[in-house]
Image (tube, rainbow, N blue to C red):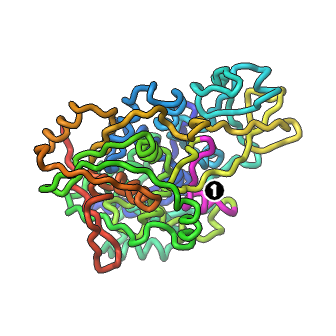
Amino acid sequence: MAEEHVSDFSIKVYVDKKKNRIVYAECGGDLVDVLLSFLTTPLGTIVSLARSQSLPTEMGCLSNLYTSAENMDVQNFHSRACKTMLLEPRNSAETHCMNLKLKVDNTLGIKYCCSSNNCTFNRHRLVGHYSDAFCPCGKSMNGKVNLSQEPMNVGGSFVKEDIGFIITDDLQVLCVSSSVCFSLCSKLGIMDVTTLEVRSLNVGANEIVNLLICSFVSTSPLSETFLKCKPAPEFIHPVLFPERSIDQSQRVEDLKINQDKSVTLKLMISKSKKTVCYAEADKDFVNLLFSFLTVPLGHVVKQIQNGCFNGCVNHLYKSVQDLDEHCFKEKGSANLVLSPSLALGCWYRNDLLGIEKSEDVPYYFSSYTFPKIYSVSRNDVPCKLPIMNSASPTDGGFLRGHKMFIVSDKLVIAPISFELCISILEEMKVPFTDIVEKSVKVNRELGLRLLMSSFVSESALTNAFIKEPIKDTSGCYAIKKEPITHTG
């Protein structure tokens, strides 16, 4: 991580001395902004951050998906930038996250332009996210430029700095008040406040990444991160998906837009185990899977917010929904977190998921300020620099050619080979005589279901295409999540 992005700060926490757990933390908007930025962070960035600290990425199959993109020969991609886009996806709320007091994403604010000055200033005037992209003029986009915030926009990202907040151990964010504090103590069975100890704790980049990763698997990430307190193992509940994963208010319009969009694949299913051994698919399906890495966390939580999580990131999402609008810095700040979009220039045109794309807001520069660029136009920075889309200009995808691929149930992806197919069957102890083929056409709704399965399950294809959802008493569909095993 870039040194200039890190700025530690302190928070005050109230610790239950008897149970050695954090009841809540008191803080200003600094820490709340960092927590809310989690929801705008692409899934691929989360995997990358976890790896940077050697943390287990307990997010279904997403680590396998990331590794597959990483190991895929660059010759299979339209360009090197297409591969980099998956491994270093950009945040659509970048201009807001630039104001975070503590940043853990070292891609924020870094842009690139054409290496030819004449092209940059006179002709194409494009700015890109990646140095290995190519300008339409044929020159490399390796001229580094830095995004600078306007003075009026500096100070706070999503919430107001001068408001006091309470953050519970399970990441509920509340406005500070004595009644809220008493209520929390009462719910936790704390009747004697003398059992509480006030401590000042330092929050750095390592703690922030730990909080983020813990929020997927723990209901007490504050205690686990700051007190190194591991709760006793609990039964892992099924992950419940809402009966309809698509917002009903948008469903009719979305179906009109995406009714003709689908991709086809062939599933190889074990008849006896009723599981998908692997799938054979072309680049269209692999493009869909790789696009999951560019999806913001908040979009996934939004789809399954009414279901049961093993962690508590859904509490964070619901807190944003429940916060009074006066807590937010600007009108629309809450929506950036609750309905995060795909970053401009980081999506492919044939995306059947139908996730909203960022507005086409250009950056600005002048010969006087260059290579510093701005997100807001001024008198001295009048020239526009539109964002370049690094995906293929022809079919809008990441991959090229007509190669077929093998996709395992755990979303390990590789070019097709008979040796790989045999290896998968041997590992699963499935004889080839037990295999049955099934062709599947994946539309938007199945695509979203696969996205959610890849986030919560280690058998994404089976859970998305084979297993019948079990409806529970709350009206949600349950998809079983396997217990997480640790090695080493």
Q: Amino acid at mark 1?
A: Glu
Instruction: Say above or below: 147 vs 258.
Output: above
Classified by dominant secondary structure, the portion drawn in magenta counts as loop
The residue located at (40%, 26%) in the rendering is: 73
Q: Give the structural element (helix, strand or loop) at label 1.
A: loop
Name the one closer to the observer, 340 or 171. Answer: 340
Instruction: Say above or below: 179 vs 263.
Output: below
The residue located at (15%, 44%) in the rendering is: 428
Among the 4 quarters of the image, the one containing residue 198: bottom left
The range drawn in magenta is: 331-345
The residue located at (28%, 76%) in the rendering is: 472
Is 286 situated left or right of 409 in this image? right
Q: Provide residue 203's location: percent of width, then percent of height.
A: 46, 45
Q: Provide residue 310's location: percent of width, then percent of height.
A: 31, 60
Instruction: Say above or below: 475 vs 269.
Output: below
Residue 284 shown in magenta? no
Position of the C terminus by quadrant? top left
Query: From where the camera sits, is residue 88 visible?
Result: yes
Q: Provide residue 123's location: percent of width, then percent of height.
A: 80, 28
Residue 340 shown in magenta? yes
The residue located at (46%, 40%) in the rendering is: 205
* Residue furthest out toward the bottom: 473
Name the one closer to the observer, 22 or 158. Answer: 158
How many numbered discs?
Answer: 1
According to the picture, the residue beneath numbered tag 1 turns out to be: 161
